[in-house]
Amino acid sequence: MIIAIDGPSGAGKSTLGRMLARELGLLYIDTGWMYRAVAFAVIEANVNASDDLAVGSLARRIDIDLHGDPDTLRVTLDRRDVTEAIRSEDVTHMSSVISAIPDVRRAMVERQREMGRRGAVLNGRDIGTVVFPDADVKFFLTAVAEERAKRRFAEEFEQNKTVDFGETLADMTERDRRDSTRADSPLRVADDAILIDSTGQSIEEVFAGMMAIVNQKSEIVNQKSEIRNQKSVI
Ligand code: DC
């Protein structure tokens, strides 16, 4: 089973993606971490982020891997663990810039299809529209910007006590604008996605709603395969 979770930042994609993957015994793939790893490599190699050719060629050359189960997920760049390093503000900003480059997207999408093909919960911006357009269940998770920024702010505050809420909100809004307006694979709701607005809901409530949809969907899939089996017996 392939489950796609797309949506803007701070909507709860990773918390809910991990919970679903754990519950269903599926692989969990955070595709944002992969773009962040490319961004980290761009900064480290001092590559000019507006040089699409150079960034694209770097993205093809590097080896990005995700290891571990949903709760212990780590990301490596050329076998080096960069899980903590990709959370910095510089990397966050750079990941939104370089993810607009078509060659970068091509390299990442190829890798994501390879990793997820045997079944996974994937979260990102283009999973249901581009990476796995035939995913069994597609969710588009969102919440009002202030609430998403509050969640992001709480995470950032744990690492850095001097962060400012206004700045977090402004950065997030700018990143979402860039992610939604780029020409290649912008963030958008797939036609057959289930839209979930988590504003004012607890994680447990949203999770229960998502699980109900997944269960319904797997019943339909099972019924269809039973009908196919009966037909082949007749
Ligand atoms: O989900 P995140 O904030 O960790 O993602 C980092 C950046 O990567 C985000 O600004 C958009 C980009 N991204 C993307 O373009 N496509 C994806 N499938 C996942 C992330």
Image (cartoon, helix red, strand yellow):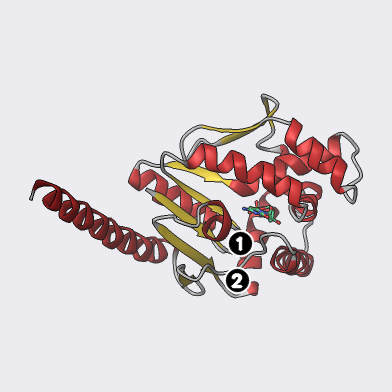
Q: Is residue 142 left or right of residue 228?
A: right
Ligand 1 within 8 Å of disc 1? The answer is no
**Which mark is in front, 1 or 2?**
1
Closer-to-camera residue (233/208): 233
The secondary structure type at the circle numbered 1 is: loop
Which of the 4 quarters of the picture holds residue 110? top right
Whether tag 1 and tag 2 are in contact, CB under 8 A, the answer is: yes
Q: Is residue 118 left or right of residue 108?
A: left
Amino acid identity at mark 1? Gly
Q: Position of residue 23 (x, y in %)?
A: 34, 47
Q: Which residue lies furthest to the top in this view?
A: 79
Q: Is residue 43 left or right of residue 214?
A: right
Residue tagged 1: 10
Task: Judge whether residue 15 can be spotted in this image.
Answer: yes
Q: Residues within 10 Å of mark 1 (few under 14, many from 20)?
A: many
Q: How crowded is mark 2: few (under 14 residues within 10 Å), some or many (20 or more)?
A: some
Which circle marks residue 147 in the picture? 2
Which of the 4 quarters of the picture holds residue 40? top right
User: Ligand 1 shows up in which quadrant of the image?
Assistant: bottom right
CA gap, disc 1 and disc 2: 8 Å
Q: Where is residue 50 in the image (x, y as percent from the top left)?
A: 90, 51
In this view, 20 is above or below 205: above
Amino acid identity at mark 2? Glu
